[in-house]
Image (cartoon, grey):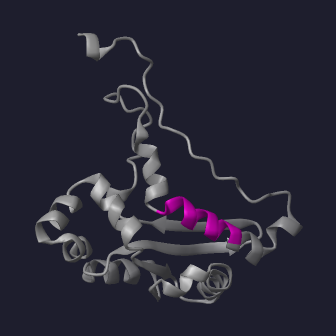
Amino acid sequence: SMFLASSFGKSTGAILTQTSIGRSLTNLLYVGTLHFAPSGPYVDSLIKHLKSTYASFKGVKYFIHSSEKMAVSYILDHLEQPALALIVLRQITPGKVNYVIRQNYTTLPNTNIALDRSTVGLNRKYQNYVLSGFMTIQKTVDEWAFSYTNASFTSDCSLPNIALMPFPTYPYNQNPFYQ
């Protein structure tokens, strides 16, 4: 990305952007922009919550878009400003909370497969959820949604506890070191 190239030099930045560690480093070193859609009372309330709850949010550059499609178009047209995430609030009511966090797929583990057959031992790809900022964003939006809908006072639901677990791996049946 342009951020890594300008921070570490052109060749180092190019090398880092081609690795999963480098892409995760970008998220750690440069927060990137946050995008929200669709514009309206949900987004306004979430941003107000972020400003009043997290002092560091004042330093985050964010954009509000009229629709998810417009947000994606803007992000793709402005690749010089790396986007941390697009948060799309689809339905926020006491009976149903439906939102989507969209991030660059290269910073998150691939969840299209349930079991990684090529991994020997513990697969550490799940740790990318922490490095990418995904879990922090998820927890923040959940806290806001429960507060916004007063869900903790009107239903039997409770704020979810987010847990981090490694992806499943096959049991050891051989040791490649001794072969």
44 lies above or below 171: below
Image position, residue 145 (x, y; %): 69, 72
Instruction: Name the quarter where the N terminus is drawn.
Output: bottom left
The part of the chain drawn in magenta is 133-143
Between 28 and 40, the residue placed more toward the observer is 28
Give the total number of marks visible in the rendering: 0
Name the quadrant containing residue 35: bottom left
Q: Main secondary structure of the magenta part?
A: helix
Which residue is farthest right? 153
Residue pictured at 20% horizontal, 77% vertical: 6
Image position, residue 159 (x, y; %): 75, 60
Image position, residue 171 (x, y; %): 45, 18
Between 139 and 59, the residue placed more toward the observer is 59
Name the quadrant containing residue 93: bottom right
The reply to whether residue 6 is visible in this rendering is yes
Image position, residue 66 (x, y; %): 47, 88
Residue pictured at 43% horizontal, 31% vertical: 122
Residue pictured at 45% horizontal, 79% vertical: 34
The reply to whether residue 105 is visible in this rendering is no
Residue 68 lies within the magenta run: no
> Is 152 on the left or on the right of 97, as rendered?
right
Which residue is farthest front? 8
Residue pictured at 66% horizontal, 66% vertical: 142
Between 134 and 100, the residue placed more toward the observer is 134
112 lies above or below 14: above
Instruction: Name the quarter where the C terminus is drawn.
Output: top left
Between 158 and 154, the residue placed more toward the observer is 158
Residue 136 lies within the magenta run: yes
Name the quadrant containing residue 52: bottom right
59 lies above or below 23: below
